Image: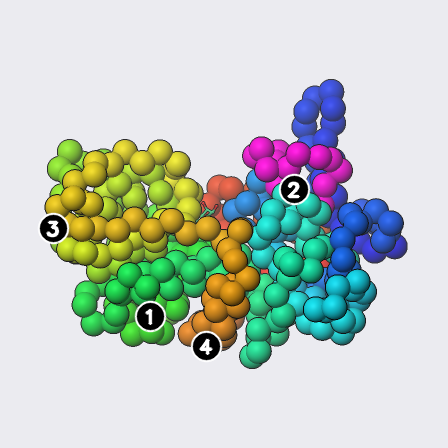
């Protein structure tokens, strides 16, 4: 028997509750690879799945945790053998399939990647889906012409998980980074990650009538969406790109097409969940190379399985700073 965070649903009230319980190997779903999980993490989606599910979880009881890193214990797939270190992000694990908030997980071999060289399992989870997605967002900007030295790159939701990692990577690559935050108390933290300018959320969160404003940003990693993304589109420099990653501020996009037509602005969609294997490897290799590990450590808090119900509520309220690493064996 081993520990897992199990979410149960009361059929009468429809309410869910999450608690650490003992489960066995026979409870795990059928799949090719059994992993002894070492670390997991907390993303916005985890907040939804620990709580009422947000439409992501279809079946209860459920074990959330969209990311994990650990060691292969058993494998019926030739690509993995016991003792291999592996990482999992995405593929709807932790939502439709049981996830990483458990001392053991069983998943498809296709969903795993070998632990990138130069990263420990703990560091891989300090990165997690949030950091992996930040890297995909930066790579997409680069693929569309972003190079250092042409002006500031904007990061929205900067003190959150995606934003913190994007800030650290972009600064390390030599970009000037402007960080948007609604939490002025995180200024020192964001400057420590390499931001050179702090933009107050309210400065950029309100809708304006003009579809175009001064050309300000040479790129943007946007974790917020909504009115903020609409506003940012009108502030992009000619030909610049925005990687749209998240919807922490809303899913609606109250924008006009004018920035696309008159400034050749590109809006790039970023999805981490179904990302093909080759690009996953490329992104993890870039993380190991371009994310300074001291900056990563500066954004990490440690937690246990028992802390998760509270952390799930916090992240939905936008109150988690940086990244959380969950030691499932603590
Ligand atoms: N596309 C993908 O594959 C993918 C992958 C990972 C995450 N995501 C999405 O990306 C977003 C960020 O994820 P995360 O893990 O970084 O979450 P997070 O740690 O909670 O960060 C989100 C940040 O957005 C800001 N924010 C929150 N509410 C806001 C509001 N109402 N208006 C403006 N800003 C607000 C806050 O930053 P400040 O306090 O600094 O303002 C918050 O820390 C989520 O929507 C998540 O679902 C998408």
**Label 1, label 2: how far apart the Cα atoms are:** 36 Å
Q: Is residue 245 above or below residue 34?
A: above
Residue sitting farthest toward the bottom:
118
Q: Which residue is mark 1?
A: 171
Report the span colored magenta.
Answer: 49-63
Mark closest to the chain's N terminus, 1 or 3: 1
Q: Quadrant of the N terminus?
A: bottom right
Q: Which residue is mark 2?
A: 96
Magenta segment's dominant SS is loop
Mark closest to the chain's N terminus, 1 or 2: 2
Using the rendered image of the protein, determine whether residue 303 is visible from the camera's viewpoint.
no
Q: Residue at x 59, y 37 (%)?
A: 56
Side (left or right) of 109 relative to 137: right
Q: Residue at x 29, y 56 (%)?
A: 220
Element class at badge 1: helix
Mark closest to the chain's N terminus, 4 or 3: 3
Residue 310 x/y as whole percent:
61, 45
Mark closest to the chain's N terminus, 4 or 1: 1
Q: Residue at x 42, y 43 (%)?
A: 248
**Label 4, label 1: how far apart the Cα atoms are:** 13 Å
Q: Nearer the viewer, mark 4 or mark 3?
A: 4
């Amino acid at each position: 028997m081993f520990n897992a965070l199990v979410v149960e649903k009361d059929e009468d009230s429809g309410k869910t509750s999450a608690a650490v319980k003992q489960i066995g190997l026979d409870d795990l779903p059928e799949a090719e690879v059994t992993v002894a999980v070492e670390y997991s993490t907390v993303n916005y989606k985890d907040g939804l799945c620990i709580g009422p599910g947000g439409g992501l979880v279809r079946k209860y009881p459920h074990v959330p945790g969209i990311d994990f890193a650990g060691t292969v214990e058993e494998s019926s797939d030739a690509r993995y053998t016991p003792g291999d270190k592996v990482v999992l992000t995405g593929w709807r694990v932790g939502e439709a399939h049981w996830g990483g908030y458990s001392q053991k997980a069983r998943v498809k071999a296709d969903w795993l990647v070998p632990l990138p060289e130069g990263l420990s399992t703990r560091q891989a989870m300090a990165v997690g889906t949030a950091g992996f997605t930040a890297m995909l967002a930066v790579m997409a900007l680069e693929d569309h012409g972003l190079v250092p030295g042409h002006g500031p790159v904007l990061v929205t939701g900067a003190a959150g998980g995606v934003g913190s990692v994007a800030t650290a990577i972009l600064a390390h690559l030599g970009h000037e980074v402007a960080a948007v935050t609604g939490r002025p108390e995180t200024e020192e933290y964001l400057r420590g990650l390499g931001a050179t300018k702090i933009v107050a959320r309210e400065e950029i969160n309100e809708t304006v009538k003009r579809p175009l404003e001064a050309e300000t940003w040479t790129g943007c990693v946007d974790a917020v969406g909504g009115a903020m993304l609409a506003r940012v589109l009108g502030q992009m420099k000619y030909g610049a790109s925005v990687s749209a990653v998240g919807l922490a501020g809303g899913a609606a996009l109250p924008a006009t097409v004018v920035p696309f037509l008159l400034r050749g602005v590109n809006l790039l969609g970023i999805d981490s969940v179904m990302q093909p294997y080759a690009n996953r490897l490329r992104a993890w290799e870039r993380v190991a190379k371009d994310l300074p590990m001291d900056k990563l450590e500066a954004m990490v808090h440690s937690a246990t399985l028992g802390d998760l119900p509270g952390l799930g509520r916090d992240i939905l309220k936008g109150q988690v700073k940086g990244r959380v690493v969950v030691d499932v064996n603590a």
